[in-house]
Image: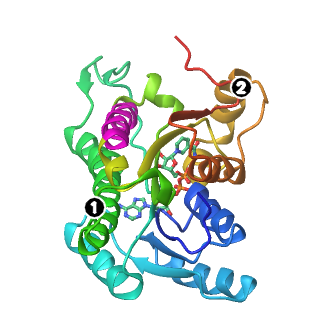
Amino acid sequence: MQLYGKVAVITGAASGIGRATCIAMMDLGIEAIAAVDRSSQIIEQCNTLNHEVGRSVLVPYVGDVTSDEFRRSVFADLRHRFGVVHICVPAAGITRDRLAVKHHKDNGGGVDIYPRSDFEDVMQINLIAPIYWALETIATVAEDRTRRGMPKWEPSEGTQGGVVFIGSVSSMGNKGQISYATAKAGLAGAQATLAKEAIFYGIRCNIIHPGYTDTPMVRALGEDLIRQVILPQTQLRRLLRPEEVADAICFLLRNSAVSGSLWVDAGWHPAA
Ligand SMILES: NC(=O)c1ccc[n+]([C@@H]2O[C@H](COP(=O)([O-])OP(=O)(O)OC[C@H]3O[C@@H](n4cnc5c(N)ncnc54)[C@H](O)[C@@H]3O)[C@@H](O)[C@H]2O)c1
C-alpha cells in the first residue's frame, strides 16, 4: 500500500517512536497525519515539521488518548476535514515499572503488591486506548464503504488502510513490568482479532514489538541500568533509534504480504 493520498492518525506523536513515525510517513508522501499527544509541544512540533516539508501535513490535536470525548472529537474533526482515516499507529504509552510483589529490606521487612491504580492507568493508556483509536479508524473506512454501497472489500481495489499496534519485547515477560508486559501482550490479541475482522473492509492490522529504543521513556530508566542491564543483552550493544522503529512500522504498512507481528528487537531477550 502506498502512503500517497492516505490520512493517518498517530498518537504519542510529540516524542520518540510516534514523532519518528510522523517524519517517516511525511517522507513517504502521506497526505495528512493527525498528530495526537497530551503534550502541547505537539503544536510547535507540527508547525516546525510542516514548515520543513513546505506543506501542511501534520494536524495537531492536544488531549488525553484515554478520553472517549477527546477521541470522538478528533475523529469528528477528521471526518469533516478528510472523510476517511486510513491508517492508525496508536503509539502513546507509559510505564509504571515495579516488582509485582516487593519485599522491603528496611522498615521491618514488609511485603507489598503492585498498586492497582498504576495497573489500571497502564491498561487504560497502553491497551484500551490503542484499541479504541484503531476501532475508530476502521469505522471511518467502514462508514465510507457502506455509504458508497460497497462495504465488502475486493482484492482488485488494493489495500485500503492499516493499523500498526506498538507492542514490546516486554510482552514476552519482563521483570518489573507486570502492568506494561500485560498490556503489550493484550495488544497482540487485539491485533490478531482485528486482522481477521478488518480485512472485510480492506484494512490490515499488524503489531510491532520494538526492543529498547532511545526515547525519553527509556532514558528515564537511567544511564546505569541501560549500560549494565539492557545493552549487554542486545546483539547491537546499543539502543535502537526511533527512526529504525518508524521505518519498520512503515514497512508493515506498505508491504501487504506481511501479516502478524514484527520483532524489531536487536536480538534483545528478557532475562530469566
Ligand atoms: N522506547 C522503547 O524502548 C519502547 C520499546 C517498545 C515499545 N515502546 C512503545 O512505543 C510507544 C512509544 O514509546 P516512546 O518510547 O516513544 O515513548 P515516549 O515517552 O518518548 O513518548 C510517548 C508519548 O506518548 C504521550 N502520551 C503518554 N500518555 C498519553 C496520554 N494519556 N494521552 C496522550 N498522549 C500520551 C507522551 O506525552 C509522549 O509524547 C509506547 O507505546 C511504548 O510503550 C517503546
Q: Nearer the viewer, residue 159 or 252?
A: 159
Q: Nearer the viewer, residue 196 or 169?
A: 196
Point 71% across, 42% down: residue: 240
Q: Which residue is mark 2?
A: 234
Main SS, magenta region, reads helix
- Give the percent coordinates (x, y) of residue 58: 56, 79
Total count of labels = 2
- Give the percent coordinates (x, y) of residue 28: 69, 66
- Rendered view: 99 above or below 69: above
Q: Residue furthest top?
A: 272
Residue behind label 2 places its C-beta within 8 angstroms of ligand 1: no
Residue behind label 1 places its C-beta within 8 angstroms of ligand 1: no
Judged left or right of residue 22, residue 200 is: left
Point 29% across, 65% down: residue: 150
Judged left or right of residue 203, residue 64 is: left
Q: Which image quadrant: the N terminus?
A: bottom right
Identity, as a three-letter code, of the amino acid under mark 1: Pro
- Rendered view: 171 above or below 240: above
Identity, as a three-letter code, of the amino acid under mark 2: Thr
Magenta residues?
179-196
In magenta segment, residue 184: yes
Foreground tag (2 vs 1): 1
Lower position in the chain sequence, tag 2 or tag 1: 1
Q: Which residue is mark 1?
A: 151
| Label 2 residue SS | loop
In magenta segment, residue 185: yes
Real-space CA distance between mark 2 and mark 1, rounded to the nearest whole angstrom:
45 Å
Point 51% across, 57% down: residue: 158
Q: Residues within 10 Å of mark 1 (few under 14, many from 20)?
A: some
Judged left or right of residue 80, residue 34 is: right
Asked whether residue 220 appears in the rendered view, the answer is yes
Asked whether residue 175 appears in the rendered view, the answer is no
